[in-house]
Amino acid sequence: MKERVLDLVFLIGVLFKGLDGLLELVGGAVLLFVTPGQVQRAAERVTARELAEDPHDLVANLVVHGAAHLHGRSVWFVAAYLLLHGLVKLAIVVALLVGTRRIYPWAMAALGAFLAFQLYELIVRPSVAVAVLTVLDAVIIWLTWREWRRGRELRTTWRQTVAWVFRRPQPREA
């Protein structure tokens, strides 16, 4: 049972990384075409209702604060980071979905490099969001290592886990 739950967490984590990578690609592309002022106004519009209800909302305040600190070169850096990070995450997910076990070490290395950068960011500019992402990335790396050591391709884990999740109860014998 524990093994199946870990398999499910791994699959959800991989799918989340793919979705996150797609969102990062879109966000990075958008940043290439909008001004910091437009980003700030959009952040204020998106968070206005939440901040009216709760002026101390952590996520809404982080969004507004982050948008307010975007300017010139930082926009280009954030855009490049999001594009690169998103592209690598999507490439890893696609490679895991269609590839062989040989991709696992590369995936762990790429995620490990991003993890190292996030640890650096935590030291230089501590933030709850980066801390949470760092922990999640560490868990995904561990689960990827676990799958690699077990000698299974993602397709096999996917099939077995889906079968387990949607299994039909067996009728009891009389």
Image (cartoon, helix red, strand yellow):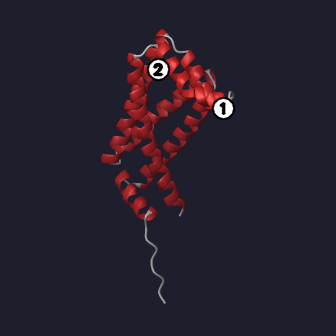
Question: What's the CA distance linking mark 1 and mark 2?
Answer: 30 Å
Q: Earlier in the sequence, mark 1 or mark 2?
A: 1
Residue 145 shows in the view:
no
Residue type, label 2: Val
165 or 34, nearer to the observer? 34
Q: Is residue 68 above or below residue 19?
A: above
How far from the left and from the top, in percent, is residue 22? Answer: 39, 34
Residue 116 shows in the view:
yes
- Residue lying at 62% horizontally and 25% vertically, measured from the top left: 61
Instruction: Check disc 2: other Cα within 10 Å, few if <14, some if 14-19, many if 20+.
Output: some
Secondary-structure class at tag 2 = helix
Secondary-structure class at tag 1 = helix
How far from the left and from the top, in percent, is residue 64? Answer: 58, 22
- Residue lying at 49% horizontally and 60% vertically, measured from the top left: 4
Q: Is residue 170 above or below residue 5?
A: below
* Residue 53, label in figure: 1
Q: Verify CB contact (< 8 Å) between mark 1 and mark 2.
A: no
Q: Is residue 64 above or below residue 113?
A: above
The residue that mark 2 highlights is 78
47 or 161, nearer to the observer? 47
How far from the left and from the top, in percent, is residue 114? Answer: 48, 30
Residue type, label 1: Glu
